[in-house]
Image (cartoon, coloured by chain):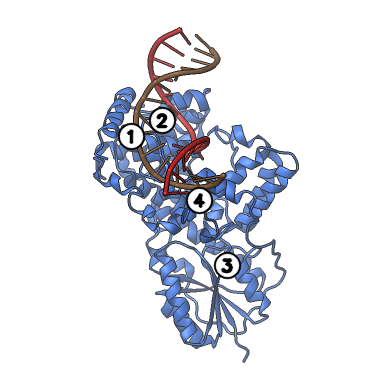
Chain colours: A blue, B red, C brown
Amino acid sequence: MEKPIIYWIRRDFRIDNNPALKFAIDTEQPIIPVFIRDEFVDSLGSAPKWRLELGLECLAQKYKTYGLDIIFKTGSADKVLTELINETNADKVVWGRTYLPPLNDRDTKIKSLLKQKGIMAKSFPGHLLFEPWSVSPKSSDFFKVYTPFWKTTRHKDPLGSIIKVTQIRSSNQQPKSENLKNWGLGEGMSTGASIVHQHVRLGEKAAKERLDWFIANKVMHYSSSRDIPSLDGTSGLSENLSLGEISPIECWNAGVQALEAGHDDAEIFLKELVWREFAYHLAYHTPRILDQNWRQEWDSFPWNTNENDEKVLLWKQGRTGVPFVDAAMRELYVTGRMHNRGRMIVASFLTKHLMTHWKIGLKWFENCLIDWDPASNAMGWQWSAGSGPDATPYFRVFNPNTQLEKFDKENIYRNMWLAEFSGKNSKNALSFFDAIPKKWKLKPDMEYPESIVDLSEGRTLALEAYKNRQF
DNA sequence: TTTTGAGTTGTTCGA
DNA sequence: GTCGAACAACTCAAA
């Protein structure tokens, strides 16, 4: 019986432009694709876990068209892979790297364990444009500032080339698979699932089509339209990038082509892709960014750390009485995403006006975002809070009302998400009330609340605290 | 080693 | 309404 190769599916939910899968195909051995529900899958936040299930269903269908079934298994990865090797007599295991601890350390151990058994174990790039260790400054170990990182990467060729797959060789052996539907990955979502579902862009094909559409219609206006939250002016591909339903290299190449075709704004799109890289670069070199203050002196800052604080709850519910903040928080709840400008504003509001620890915000995002990415989420929150690697002047406090004036002058975004303003005119605004838990006891005809903080007072208090900090 | 220049995303005030 | 200055001072990258 011919020995098969095991392809371990990680964050590369695609067929094309997938170096690990390509390697497997090139061995000409039969391929057994496996997805393992390990402790790291179980520990995902509600929305990312739910989105993972959708992504897996879609991917399984795609594999079916090539005549392959994904094998679903639960357990620690070393144990599952070992059993699968024994069962199938496979002699190779390949997967795409995910770079961040603790997964990275786990993978290193598995690699040496498999090699000890005489199995070829190989990991591949594919999740990023560049390996985090392959970009470094001349005078230190790694970059702590974005702009020099960008200057270094902009003229660097990303890893790998375009890969198109036409066939995949399946295996005659059919190892026992669990049923994905029985895993209940979507259970944490409860009432909101059917509503968020309407806003999901699912799978490799849809992601590619979106990229084409974005490059054909939007990238040329990107520098200005990406800042307007009422417009569909961004690529919106973060959701697909997070599961690897599209390759970042494909996005990069499309951006480069647009730039070469004379659309200068495409460079800003490339810069955004590089922000994602920068987040991984930082997390790879300083893993503490994921769950501790990157600048450790911030440990003594007097954040509010009470998760059950009344104002924190109102922030989560989009009931702070500050329209831009509430609109963005409701957009998050209904769509599982939030416009980038909204992310900055709600983060600034939580960490500065409400003086609340960024970890509380990070955790909420981790539960609500279908495009959740551990590296980007942590970098963004720490940047907003001021504890991160960017030298953010402490006096930089977003005023949500000034922001509304600048980026939503006609109140389009506000009315899109706040039924208290738009009445029955906005389907989106109303759907928020169907998505939320009943126990929140919120109704669309309720009166819009008074602001929970006086914005200028909140700003002053935050500035005071930042000024008086003990470091 | 030392020096120099630069650093995602802002707000407010007063001329 | 528009525009420039002030808001401080520090870390990082490169020469």
Asked whether disc 2 touches disc 1, contact meaning CB atoms under 8 Å apart, the reply is yes
Instruction: Mark 2: give few (<14), some (14-19) or many (20+) Cα within 10 Å.
Output: some
Residue type, numbered disc 2 = Phe
Residue identified by numbered label 1: A352
**Chain of the residue where label 4 is placed in the rendered structure:** A
Both on one chain, marks 2 and 1? yes
Image quadrant of residue A64? Answer: bottom right
Residue identified by numbered label 2: A398
Residue A289 disc label: none
Spatial CA span between label 3 and label 1: 44 Å
**Could you say where residue A211 lies in the image, as x and y percent from the top left?**
65, 49
Spatial CA span between label 4 and label 3: 31 Å
Q: Nearer the viewer, residue A337 or A446?
A: A337
Q: Residue at x 40, y 36 (%)?
A: A346
Q: Is residue A283 left or right of residue A252?
A: left
Residue type, numbered disc 3 = Ala
Residue A60 disc label: 3
Q: Does A131 appear above or below A9?
A: above
